[in-house]
Image (tube, coloured by chain):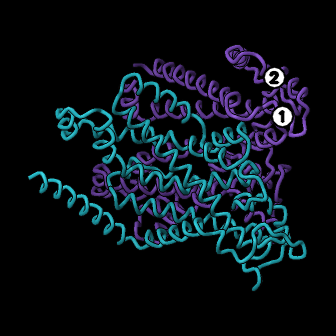
Chain colours: A cyan, B purple
Amino acid sequence: MEDSLAWRIKEAKKKRLLEVWEAFKSNRVALVALSIIVFVIIVTLIGPHITPYDPYDFDLRKARQPPSREHILGADELGRDILSRLLVGARYTVGISVVSIAIGASLGTLLGLISGYKGGFSDSLIQRVNDVLLAFPTILLAIALVAFKGPGVSSLILAIAVSFMPVYVRLVRASVLQVVVEDYIAAVKLLGLGSWRIMLRHVLPNVMSPVIVQATYHMGLAILVASALGFLGLGVPPPTPEWGSMIGTGKVYLFSAPHIVVFPGLFISITIIAFNILGDGLRDALDPRARALLRRF
Amino acid sequence: MSLVNYVIYRLSQAFITFLGASLLIFLFVRLLPGDPARLIAGPEALEEDIQMIRAQLGLDRPLYEQFATYMVSLLKGDLGTSIKYSTPVLDEILARLPYTLVLAFTAEALAVAAAVPLGILAALKPRSLVSQLVSVLAVVGASLPVFWTGLMLIFIFSVELKLLPSSGSGSPKHLILPSVTLAFFLIGNLARITRAAVMESLASNHVVTARAKGLSLGKILTRHVLRNSLIPILTVASVQLGALLGGAVVTETVFAWPGIGSLLIDSLFFRDYPLAQGVIMFTVGAFILINIVTDILYALVDPRVREVLWKTV
């Protein structure tokens, strides 16, 4: 009897995943977006190994050369191969965004879980601090954190993670409040399970769908913020080929060599568009009713 | 609860949030690894110089004493003195503020003027090209980084066509490119919200009745549909406007537009940290205030919202 129940639960979970995938698959645009993202992530992982040239190797004779057979996307203001720099730069722009959102979403989810499930003093405390963080426009909070902590990869990750975290605290708390009144939670409480076990095993899985969708949208937004900070000169210091800082340092040559600015911008834009479309697709596939709760911003 | 009580309640709540935000910024500066005095002094500074700057900024005193001094002057409206300009930070901000306000309002007005008609057309014909355009704009507009679209617009209209100035603020012409850049970022989302609101309202019972009565489409739209769709549109527009006041940093920098956004970036590069801190405090205060004004306006406009808001209080 035990076995058959566990087996039935497992089957039901498998069936649910399959249903989500079926729903997602029927959305052709979202499939294209997913393949673009898979491609970008592969580039992020193996980028430095597939560059045609050394991304740091400058050659002033080739400075600002437009795209040619030799340099498919042209050379930048110091004669460095733009394609090679973009391939390596994914590691910074996309990599930093992935890590930041992973940290921000996990921390925010944990705090939202505690806030919503425990209530009382911890709830008030978390909510008051969260209100303060939400009082900052996202990019301003990120700028403030980066500016006062100094440039570098770790400050960028901290800045973006902290700027996006409050959204998850609010989102998860709201979802938890809906879940805790369900009968199955009352049932596990009666069974005498500890509150941490109930939170992590029984509440958390039921609030994950909106978190996953929100995190997908936030990937796009995080790339936007990371590259904007790079553009402003507050991100990873040069000569690191972060996509936004490539535009920031190349913008002076907009008049004579626009390709230096055009190609990194296309990489950023296409990646963000893909994440936003994937987010829409996931939202529709996971739970069409969740639409009202989730916003892309 | 009466409206007056509600306003008082919201303002006091906002004041607490603002105090929290000041504490947070205060802590950012003092507790994060990295020494503001060292940052201001620059990498080649001598240890004595750093000590001197530390004493000048009061950073050598105990933390609670520093916070007390900081809060007292903040509540007096004193945001400190700029290191670069040697003028009060507040004066510097107020001198730049009109530029940011003009840019933000122009961009938002452009976005509303384009998005609302688009959204209405899309809602009337959900399968048309216009509707698809709204869907595409909603994704693409919000995905392209403003610093890139800005540079692309400069390239097209200043470099190639030589129609518009690329940066600065000398004439109304200078306002066109930065506000179009920002508006492009906002249009898609706003048009999508308008479409959803108008579609929902078109399907509601009172509109169906009005149609059955044989009222003309124009009258139905202006009298019944738009009035009900206005709330979500206004919500999004005011949230956008609030974000623009603090978030136009990037656009202002691209176009060298002399608002408070570019003032913030300048202050960071000059390590003018009292100025930077002041601009951030000011913007957060403005952001909080706009959110409250929006909430209070709803309460005045929509009796349903009023009821919900007052009950939650």
**Outermost residue, bottom direction?**
A69
Q: Amino acid at mark 1?
A: Ile
B273 to the left or right of B281: right
* CB contact under 8 Å: marks 1 and 2: yes
Q: How many marks?
A: 2
Q: Amino acid at mark 2?
A: Leu
Q: Quadrant of the C terminus of chain B?
A: top left
Q: Is residue B218 above or below residue A145?
A: below
Q: Quadrant of the N terminus of chain B?
A: top left
Asked which secondary structure carries label 2, the reply is loop
Who's the residue at 54% across and 71% down the image? A39
Q: Is residue B236 above or below residue B287?
A: below
**In the image, residue A115 lies at what x, y percent?**
40, 32
State which tag comes first along the sequence, 1 or 2: 1
Query: Pointer 2: residues within 10 angstroms few (<14), some, or many (20+)?
Result: some
A274 to the left or right of A171: right
Residue under circle 2? B57
Q: Which of the chains bears the disc numbered 2?
A: B
Residue under circle 1? B40
Rendered image quadrant of residue A53 = bottom right
Q: Is residue A34 above or below residue A69?
A: above
**In the image, residue A195 lies at what x, y percent?**
30, 32
Q: Is residue A145 above or below residue A89?
A: above
**In the image, residue A276 lies at what x, y percent?**
50, 60
Q: Which of the chains bears the disc numbered 1?
A: B
- Observer-nearest of B299 and A124: A124
Residue B234 in view, yes or no: yes
**In the image, residue B11 lies at what x, y percent?**
54, 22
- Observer-nearest of B4 and B42: B42
